[in-house]
Every structure is written in structure tokens, then in C-alpha cells.
Image (cartoon, coloured by chain):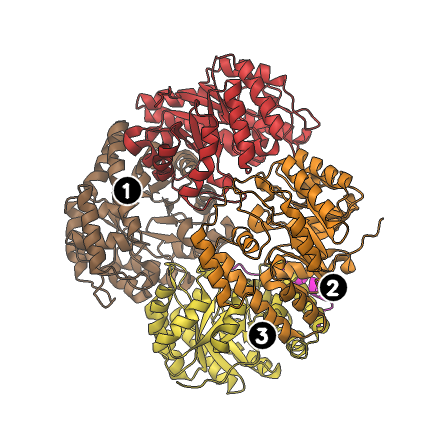
Chain colours: A orange, B red, C brown, D yellow
Amino acid sequence: MKNYQRLKGMVAAAFTPMTPDGNLNLPAIDAYAERTAASKMAGIFVCGTTGESLSLTTQERKDVLERWIKAADKRFKVIAHVGSNSLMEAIELARHAAEQGADAIAAMAPGFFKPGSVKELIDFFAPIAHAAEDLPFYYYNMPSMTGVSLSVAEFLHEGKKVMPNLVGCKFTHNNLMEMGECLALDNGAFEILHGYDEILITGLSFGATAGVGSTYNYLPEVYRGIFEAMEKGELEKARELQMKSIEVVKIIIKYGGGVRGGKAIMNLIGIDCGPCRLPISPVSNEEYERLRKDLLEIGFSF
Amino acid sequence: MKNYQRLKGMVAAAFTPMTPDGNLNLPAIDAYAERTAASKMAGIFVCGTTGESLSLTTQERKDVLERWIKAADKRFKVIAHVGSNSLMEAIELARHAAEQGADAIAAMAPGFFKPGSVKELIDFFAPIAHAAEDLPFYYYNMPSMTGVSLSVAEFLHEGKKVMPNLVGCKFTHNNLMEMGECLALDNGAFEILHGYDEILITGLSFGATAGVGSTYNYLPEVYRGIFEAMEKGELEKARELQMKSIEVVKIIIKYGGGVRGGKAIMNLIGIDCGPCRLPISPVSNEEYERLRKDLLEIGFSF
Amino acid sequence: MKNYQRLKGMVAAAFTPMTPDGNLNLPAIDAYAERTAASKMAGIFVCGTTGESLSLTTQERKDVLERWIKAADKRFKVIAHVGSNSLMEAIELARHAAEQGADAIAAMAPGFFKPGSVKELIDFFAPIAHAAEDLPFYYYNMPSMTGVSLSVAEFLHEGKKVMPNLVGCKFTHNNLMEMGECLALDNGAFEILHGYDEILITGLSFGATAGVGSTYNYLPEVYRGIFEAMEKGELEKARELQMKSIEVVKIIIKYGGGVRGGKAIMNLIGIDCGPCRLPISPVSNEEYERLRKDLLEIGFSF
Amino acid sequence: MKNYQRLKGMVAAAFTPMTPDGNLNLPAIDAYAERTAASKMAGIFVCGTTGESLSLTTQERKDVLERWIKAADKRFKVIAHVGSNSLMEAIELARHAAEQGADAIAAMAPGFFKPGSVKELIDFFAPIAHAAEDLPFYYYNMPSMTGVSLSVAEFLHEGKKVMPNLVGCKFTHNNLMEMGECLALDNGAFEILHGYDEILITGLSFGATAGVGSTYNYLPEVYRGIFEAMEKGELEKARELQMKSIEVVKIIIKYGGGVRGGKAIMNLIGIDCGPCRLPISPVSNEEYERLRKDLLEIGFSF
């Protein structure tokens, strides 16, 4: 079995830049990638929830991935999210990711027809993982978006038997006990990437060593600080930084959450990401003004 | 404003025939269409939930629709479900439906990023409805699958202002009070197609005159009987027939519900529909045997 | 086994009259009972959800029941709701109801620790039913309040074996298919009392012949009309009346629902019921004014 | 304003000892209290969820509290849970707790009629807190049992204005971000007692310094170790102990959860707690055997 290098530290969940009319803005990815490299990200997670994944067409997802791979230029890993309600599309995306030189693939569970057992989840993922068999495959566990809440530990343990490239999961759920179990599973055989930015210290308490987050994009120093403090056991320092991240998360919630509000912050800090695609509504000028003010009030530096 | 002819009676929700390896089986649609015509269906609802809609690729959805339009040969209406999490795909499917000569389009709400208000729902649907502006457009309300439960009455009333071709909705929800409201709305301006087969008499009590159902495919005489009895006010007769439908629905629930269990029944009655696509698991031979036995026990005639 | 007389037509769910300071106003029950008799109610359902059941102390529930039995004076049946999270309290209330001469008892499932199977539900109810073994016992099925949604049909069928006085259920749920099953169960062995006023015609379509409702209190002529029209198969007439009831229900929803809004209407029509007990907040004078106006607008006659 | 001493470390959530026939076994509290003192608990939380609170009558809750106060004999604090769906009962219990010399009161939100806003929650609790105005009052936040999920931070901040004895909350929810906010609120003005044993390290990461737990009763040395390790920043040690606690929690889940499974473990370790009251079903001998075996397998020492 192949030995994959583990991720360490921050993986940014990429927003997908769009033009004002809601089409892709591929060239904007280049400047975004520069910032990503400068922020010392370990990787970028492309076309996941933050990247408006299922709002894109299959072709658009390919285009976005290709641009990221080129722009990253090996300075950070590129993880391609290939999940889809359509098995056929997911397979096609997995194959494409492998061909184009992505460093890993990830997939969320289908949320329309929901797998009702771990076995069904494995059966669905197996051909996808197989379509990119040379790349590490992460299960993207996010019950709040997919409505699929099956035992992740059981999935990893059983899934590994038929998907040798299954290396772990992006754990975006507030069931921290389960996260702890997954980290301890099979003597730490799996990489568990922490998913909820606002509670990063809890995942790190349980032993996670990497995370995927959308707010990492505009608060890299805060999260880098958290990773470092937790590694040294400096809980109080980590906690203070976490409270800073929470202050920002509370603000983005007011503006529609991490995708809508987060994309607006990207625009405010000068990384052109444009609006979200419908059904996520555009951010008005008046909202931008209020958002900027809210951020200034908590000392956010643009 | 154009005047569209209303649907009356049964519209069958089409299963999508597949080959044993999970690919489309387009030729099988021809025999299926013959049966549909022979059963005196008013229409066929293509690539909706029963048709495994979101499990198909965009191209596959086009292929299935084209085959149905050809096979129907104007003997019954063809309604194209064009809903998608991707606005771009939905627009493309709507345009395609219009070009190919479908009789109407319908779309469910996006369930990944969920519209949070009626306004957001209208904003999402407007460009889709516009892309097939000469066809009647039905909102496909199905909170159990999409997780979107917004006021349908408000949507219809407000949506009509910006989507002149919005003619009504497929109401697949157990909120019968709301269904009653929608039927009475604006002096009966909207067509409300009843959605849950097992409680058809309740929608007809409230005044619905058409329904879309997957079990109509294999129990046409039962449902025709219900429509006729309710029209004449023969409640007891309607109720007896409804209990027959419930007996069958209870059985398909045991086999994974209307899509998985229903497709299996289609195969049993000689309309080749094949298996479902993953993540819906295939029906084993042993299950087919039990299903057949269960159906025989309640007097189902093959 | 004893043969109990079935309920027919309207059973009013009683509001519990209170003084402005939130204590019981027992004397107010007398005038309320006169109106109940004048409205030709088949019965009154005491200390259920509408009666703020679990907000009352055990002693208060006894006091309210005793007053109703006396005030009813055999003109209509008195059904005592005895459900409680505490088995001991429920048994005590059941025994008290029998001693005081109630005509029947009913109990909802405990919602704090929720029975996880029909067997557990039966085990919980058996000693309660036994404590009033000479009275008919109705299971009060209301998943929206209790969070307990177990098979009612299975409960009735299995429960009957250990609770000979189990005669049926008050079915307050929008799962109409299940209601249909319960009505048909064991050749109609059980009384299924329709629960949701705004969709009464759907339960009657399925064959129910009695209902328990809070809006019956102030719209008796509307619901009597529905019962009569449905018995004659006059669907259109029944539907028109149902739409009148829906208009009122939509208004009470604006004022906090059937208990808070309904109690306010009782006060407006001259049946002194006072405020609800906390946590249901009191209705302000300004709200009373708006409510009265809303009702006048739809032609409600005070 | 009075200055209350804060809790530090472990507060055990008390099981309520019962006889085989489901009545209280008050004398058994004495031996239980000895063990509690020997385990160096900072306090005991009486008649909360673990104590089957709402399954008890008001008189039983008083009896249990009185016995605990006497048996504790000032060796550890006694916190009386007084929450109830009935405001009148909660007030009565609060007054009783104060009269009998409890050290603090706590109350969960009413779960039958659910407060719909922080204001309604405050209005409900104010008279309860007032009825024991000399005791510190903790809000018991447990959305999984009550269905009430309102902003705890807002409740604490606003509630303090009308309830001077509101000192904090027992936070039994997996919304760790909110827990972090509550801990930081108003410069740490409130005590936030960690609630979910299996993720104690996450609450301590956020700065909690005390917890209330049912598994503390039979794993005191594990949790004491976690508290100590986290205080010293020894994350790895804390994590190892947490994994031990998770192993046990996974077992009790198999036996019906913390109340049913936990009470069984108490019996196994020699603290006579008897069965739970219905609707929680009794543990069979066969289950006891399996439970003992499961515990031995993970090295649990009896």
C-alpha cells in the first residue's frame, strides 16, 4: 500500500471567484493563489462547500480545478472535491483530478438519495476512489449539508478494505466524541482534518494536526497561532486566538454564513471573488458597508 | 397571458430504465410509453424524484427526455423536470425541454444551498422559467427531499408576477392545510397537482383534480377509480380504493420506498426498468421473491 | 369485554380558565360548560394540550376535571387527559378520573424520556389504563408535542391485548396514511378521533366520525357543517366550510397558535378564559385589538 | 450583589435510587453519598436528567433532595434541579430547596410548551429564581432533552438584570462555539459547567473549570485526571484519559444511554440504585451480564 504524506496545519477551503453576472472568473484565481502561498497554507480545498461545489456545472468544476493546479505551482497541495449526487459525475471528476495532477481527492456523501448504511456509503464511494486510485481519498463528512450522518469510524475502518487510497476524512460536524474516536482509530491510521473553524481548539485537543477552513483565507495568522499554541500546550493563548476567530464567525453568520459572508470579506480584503451564485443572494452595497464596519469594530485589519 | 390547458387525472412519475450495470436503457422507454398510453395517463413526469433525477448527468437527463417525447407521440403530455442544484444546469435543461417539444417544465428547489425566503426561491427560479417561457412551469414542492419548506401560496402569488408561465405546483408534502390554501388561492388560479399517492383522497377532498404519482404506473385502475369516485362524491368507494393503494405503499416502504421498491415492481409486471443507480442499492433476487410474495398476499395482479 | 359507546361528531378541547395572575379560575368553567352544551358538543377533552395540561400541577388538573364533570351534568361526555412524564402522576390522575365519574381517559406519551418502541409505550400505558379499567382509554398521539412517533396501528393492535379498555386514539398528526390504516385496523375495531381541525375533511375522507378540536369551541357551526356535509358526500360544501376554518387557523397561528391565540378568541367571544400560564406569554391589549380586527375582516361573528 | 463561591472540578449528576418496583429507595442515598464524598466530588446535582427528574412526582423530588442534603453533610455542595413544565411546581421546588438548605438551584427550560425567545425564557425563570433568591441559580441548557435552543449568552447577559442570583449555566450541548462565548461573556462573569462527559477536554480547552456529569460517578479518577492534566496544559495525557471515558460512554450508549446504562453500572459497582422508572425499561439479567463483560473487556475495574 502506498504511503501518503499527511497534511499538517492549514488547508484553505477555496471560494470560487465569479463575475458580477454569476459566471466563473478563472483569472482571479491567480492572485488568490499567490495569497494562499504567501499565507503558508499547506493546501487548498477546491470546489467544496465554500467553493459552491454543487452550484457549479461539471465542466466548471474541472475548469476551476485546472486553474488552481496551475496557479498553485506545487507551492501547496491541491485537493479536489469531486462529490456529486450523480455517481457518474463524481467518477468523471475524480478521473479528471488524477489526470490533471491534483494531490488528493475528497467527496461528500450524496444528499438527495441518502445512503442509509455505511455499506451503502462505501458502495457509492468505491468506484469514485478507484477512479483516482493513485491519489489519497478523503471522505468529506458534513451532515449539516448532506443530511447523511453515518458512523465515520465504521466507514473508515470498513471502507479502507475496499478503497486502499482512503486516507481519512474532513470532519465537519460537532460530534467531537466521534472525531476523537476517528483520530484514535486503528492506532491513528487515518488523517482527520478538522472542519469547523470556530472550534478548532477542540479538534486539536483531540489530536488533530490539520484542518480545512474557509476563514483561514482571511485570518491565516490567527489560525497559525492556534496550531502553534496547541502544539506547545499553551491552552490559554490558543483560547484567546480562538475567541478572535469566533468574533469573526459571529459576524459572517449575520451575513448569511461562511460562503456568502466569507466571500464578501474576501472582496473587502482585496481578493476579488465576486458574488455567490444563486440561490445564494448577492451582497448589497449597504451590506458591504455594514460588514466592513462590523469588522473594524472588532479590530479586523484589512 | 397565455392560457394553458390544465392537467386532469393521472400523471405518472416515470422511472428511468437502466441496464444492470447502472447505465441508461433508453430503448426500454418505448414499451413503458405504450403502457403509459394504454393506462390512459394524462401525462408523464420525466426525471423527477422517481426518475432518479439528481443521480443522472445533465446529458442523461436530456437523452431520457428526448426518448419520452418521441415515444409519447402526443398521446399524453410530457413534463420535464429540470430542477438542479446548479442554476446553470437547470437553465440548460429548461431550454432543452422547450426546444425538444416538452409540454411543460417543473423544478424542485435546490437542496444543497437552500433558499431561505420566498424571494430567494423566486430569484432562483425566474431565469429557469424564463428559459422555457412558452411552456407552463410547475414548482415541485417536496420538502422531504429538498429540505426547503417555504410558503407555497406566497411563492405562487408573488412568483406569478415575475414568471408569467408559473401555472401551479406539484404538491408533495403532508401539509394539507397549505395544499387547501393553494387550491383556493386567487380564485383557483393555480393548478395544484397532488403528490402523495397514499393519501390521494385527501388532496381530492380539498379540490385537486390531478395528481402525479409513481404508484400510478402499476396501479392505474385503482387511482382512476379514486379520481372517479371522488368526483361523484362516493367517499366510501374512494376510501376502499385508497386502502388498496396503501396496502401496496406499505409494501414498497419495506423495500426501500417508492423509487427502489417501485422500480422492482415495474420489473415484476414486465416493464423493464432495471436497477436503481447507486447510492440506491440493487434489489437482490431474494428480495424480488419476497416482494412478489408480499404482493400476491394482498391480491396484487401481475 | 365491555362495549363502549363511540363518540360521534365534535369533542371540544377545553381551554383552562385562569385569572389574570395565572391561577385557576374554576368558576369560569360553569359558563363555558353552558356554551359547550348549547353548541351540541359530544364531549369535552379536559386538560389536554389546549388545556395547558403539563403546565398545571397534579392537584390543579384534578380540580379542573371535577368542575367540568359537575358543570357538564351528563349533557356531554367528559374525557380526562391524564398523561404525564411521571408514571406515578398519570396513574394518580387516572384513578381520580374514574372515582370522580369521568366518561373516559386519554393520555399522551411521555416526551421527556421518550419510549423508543411500541413495547415501551405499551409498558408505560398499561398501569395507567389499568388504574381506570372501567373507563375507555384513548391514546393521544401527538408527535409534534411529544416527539414520540411510533406506529399507532401497531400500538393499538398490540396494546389491546394488555389493555382491554384501550378503545382508540386521538390522532393529532399529519400522517394521514397512518390514520387511514388505524381506521381500517382490525375491521374498524378502534375509534380514531381526528385531531387537526384545519384538515378535518381529510380525516373524515378516511372514515373518521368524530374529532377533538380546540377551534370547535368558537366555530361550532362550521365544524358541525363539515361533519354533516361529509356524511352526505357533499364534498364541495365541506370544502368551503373547511376553508373558513383555515382562515381562522391562519389567524391564530399569527397570535402564537391554538392555545395562546385560541384562548384570546374565547375571551373575545365572551367566554372568560383569561391568559395562558407561562411560558406562554400573555396577550397584550394591542394584540387583542389586532386579533379582533383580523377576525372581523374574514367575517367572524362575535 | 452577593458573591457566590464558584464550583471547581467534578459535580456528579445523581442517579435516583429506586426499589425493584419502581418506588424511591431513599436509604440507598446514604451509601451513595459516602462514595460521592470519598470521590472528592465538588458537588452533587440532584434530580436532573440523570436523576429522572420529570419522571418523579413533586413530593418525590423533595424527598430525594432532603435526603441528599442530610447525607452530604456539607462535605460537598448539593445543587437542586427544580425545573418543571409547570411553573408552579418549579417555584414550589425552588422554595423548598432554599428552605432545606441546598447550596444552589438549577432549572432546565420547559419542553412541552417551549419558550420561543430569550425574553420568554427569562420571564419563565424569573419567578423561579426569585423563589430561592439567596441561592445561586444555574440555567440548565440541554436542547437535546428540552427542544429549547435559544442563545445562552443572550440569556445570561439579559437574565442577570432581572435575576441577580443567576450565576451561570450547566452547558449540555455540542455547540462548543457558544460555550466559548458564554465563558468569555462579560469578562468571565458566569460559571459555565461543562455537560457532556465524553468531550470534557473540549469544554476545558475553552476555559471551563467545572463540569457536571453522570459518568463521574463511576469513573472519578479518570475525570479528575482530565481536570488536572488540562490545568497543566498536558494535552496528550488529558486526551488519553478522555479516550478511556469515551470507551465507557460507547458502552452505555449500547445499553440505552447515560441514565439506563449508567444506573446499571452503579449497581454493578455496588452502589444500589435499582432500576429506572418507566418509560425507561428495566435492565434484564442477561443485559447485566453482557454489560459486565463489555466493561471488563476495556479494563474497567469494579
Amino acid marked by disc 1 = Leu
Q: Quadrant of the C terminus of chain D?
A: bottom right
Callout 3: 10 Å neighbours few (<14), some, many (20+)?
Answer: many
Q: Earlier in the sequence, mark 3 or mark 2?
A: 3
In what element is the residue under mark 3? loop
Residue D293 is one of the magenta-drawn residues: yes
Please, is residue D220 above or below residue B190 in the view? below
Please, is residue B34 above or below residue B83 in the view? above
Q: Are marks 2 and 1 on the same chain?
A: no
Return the residue at label 2. D297
Amino acid marked by disc 3 = Gly
Per the model, the C-alpha gap separating discs 1 and 3 is 60 Å
Res B84 quadrant in image: top right
- Residue at the bottom extreme? D74
- Quick check: B155 left or right of A100? left
Chain assignment, label 2: D
Return the residue at label 1. C7
| Closer-to-camera residue (B105/B42) | B105
Return the residue at label 3. D207
Chain assignment, label 1: C
Q: Quadrant of the N terminus of chain D?
A: bottom left
In what element is the residue under mark 1? loop
- Quick check: A137 left or right of C102? right
